[in-house]
Image (cartoon, rainbow, N blue to C red):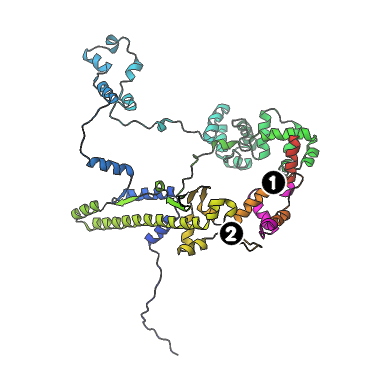
Amino acid sequence: MALSPRLEVRQSQSLTLTPQLMQSIRLLQLSHLELNAFVDAELLRNPLLEREDGAESAEADAAELPERPVEMSASEDTVDFSERIQSADSIASGYDTEVENVFPEQSGSDRASDSPVWNERSGGGDGEVPDLDQFVAARPSLSDYLAAQAGLVIADPAERLIAQFLIDSLNEAGYLAVELETVAEQLGASHATIEAVLVKLQGLDPVGVFARDVRECLAIQLREKDRFDPLMQRLLDNLELIAGHDMGALMRAVGVDREDLLDMLSELRELDPKPGRAFEAGPVESVVPDVFVRPGPGGEWQIELNSDTLPRVLVNRTYYASVTRKTRDAAEKSFLTDCLATANWLAKSLDQRAHTILKVAAEIVKQQDGFLVHGITHLRPMTLKTVADAIEMHESTVSRVTSNKYVSTPRGLFEMKYFFTTALGSSTGEGDHSAEAVRHRIRQIIEAEQPADILSDDTIAEMLQKERGIEVARRTVAKYREGMNIPSSVIRRRQKRAALAAVR
């Protein structure tokens, strides 16, 4: 069979992701803070976009109302009268003399109140009243706080440079994150000089900074309290035994009895293993829910989007029409056309995003009705595919919608991802159990155990099987326990025995 070139016409369908479609998909997974930042950037770029705010609408409505007689309050009349009064300087200049000759009792501080700066801050001038938050002192960072102290204890310029390098090498906990040999090599200084500067810096506040490990951090704080004796030193040399709550081995290693050991451990608990935490940067941001779920009057659930987190934009078509009529340049017309298309797309995408969030939230509430009524023990296993099939959407869309979104319920504030858990089989035929509900039950069992009867992972698995018919293996119990930062049965036994002995 001979091979020869030929032309064929074929018709086929394919899915093409346009840039606007990809942007719409990306909008789904943005949090409300990221979404508002994105909208603000679009408002700066697009002259046809306007933010729909209640304040602007109120101003527009007030502009359409007929004018009313202006009424002046007593305070406004007083301010207006004070503006008509001449200042002491202007009166003295009119008499061609000094202020002290006209007003002997007038002082420099009194005349300062006539300045424009005072008038603006007091509200008597035409300037805007500044925000009081602008005058609040900034919270110093750990680096700035230590640098100010280092300038007082270190006089040599070369040592100050070394000190600043060490300050910049601290991590958030206040620990030195570099080796002294590396510092000496980078700065071209001797190891003894670096060590001498480090010793000076370790005496700064907060006590414990510039330590290279937990033991050194605690030792610095104990030296400050004059409690770093040989017994304490041996105790710090066996921190792994403290973590394992092995009281017998600790008493043998330190050489003290149980009562003295408990006193020494109580001293250690009063120390701060991370002294730099008090200077953590960044304000604490509260979580704002995207959806509210409230019980309705008829027993149903009312689902409402948080309007405060949803940016609303308007397309100014009047401005577009007026500018288009006056524009003759082709490039300008093309720019306006692109702006109009982008504005229409953004308004449509925001509306579609809000409807999609509401649709997914409604299905989650429908699936997890038992959790909302009875609590975590009735949390049902649910996957992205379960919700996606119910609302006829793709799993990836549901995943994006539930990312960085929070829902406020009568049970508390939860991330939408919280309601998606895997299923564990049941031997009773009553349906599968949620992994989150199993974790909660494991925590309850461990918190209720007695010091003389600590439960192993095998025992916990058997209890779950007997009381609720949950088919769970020992390794699964161990995985869930470790995920909740709960120690093993051996360490829990030592912890509870030590706590019981401390009480006695």
Magenta region:
464-490
Q: Is residue 434 left or right of residue 254?
A: left
Q: Is residue 300 left or right of residue 121?
A: right
Marks 1 and 2 sit apart, C-alpha to C-alpha, by 26 Å
Q: Which residue is mark 2?
A: 422
| Residue 151 vs residue 26, the one in the foreground | 26
SS of the residue at dot 2? loop
Q: Which residue is mark 1?
A: 448
Mark yes or no: residue 237 visible: no
**Residue 347 image offset from top left, x and y in percent:** 34, 54
Q: Relative to 387, say whether 287 is above or below.
A: above
The answer to which of marks 1 and 2 sits earlier in the sequence is 2
> The residue under label 2 is which amino acid type?
Thr
Q: Relative to 139, say whether 371 is above or below.
A: below
Residue 47 among those drawn in magenta: no
Q: Relative to 212, say whether 155 is above or below.
A: above
Residue at point 46%, 52% (across, down):
298
Residue at point 43%, 49% (across, down):
32
| Residue 408 vs residue 40, the one in the foreground | 408
| Residue 448 vs residue 468, the one in the foreground | 468
> The residue under label 1 is which amino acid type?
Ala
Q: Quadrant of residue 199?
A: top right
Q: Quadrant of residue 117?
A: top left
Q: Residues within 10 Å of mark 1 (few under 14, many from 20)?
A: few
Q: Is residue 484 left or right of residue 345?
A: right
Question: Quadrant location of the N terminus?
Answer: bottom left
Residue 474 among those drawn in magenta: yes
**Residue 278 image offset from top left, x and y in percent:** 56, 35
Mark yes or no: residue 478 visible: yes
Residue at point 27%, 22% (across, down):
78
SS of the residue at dot 1? helix
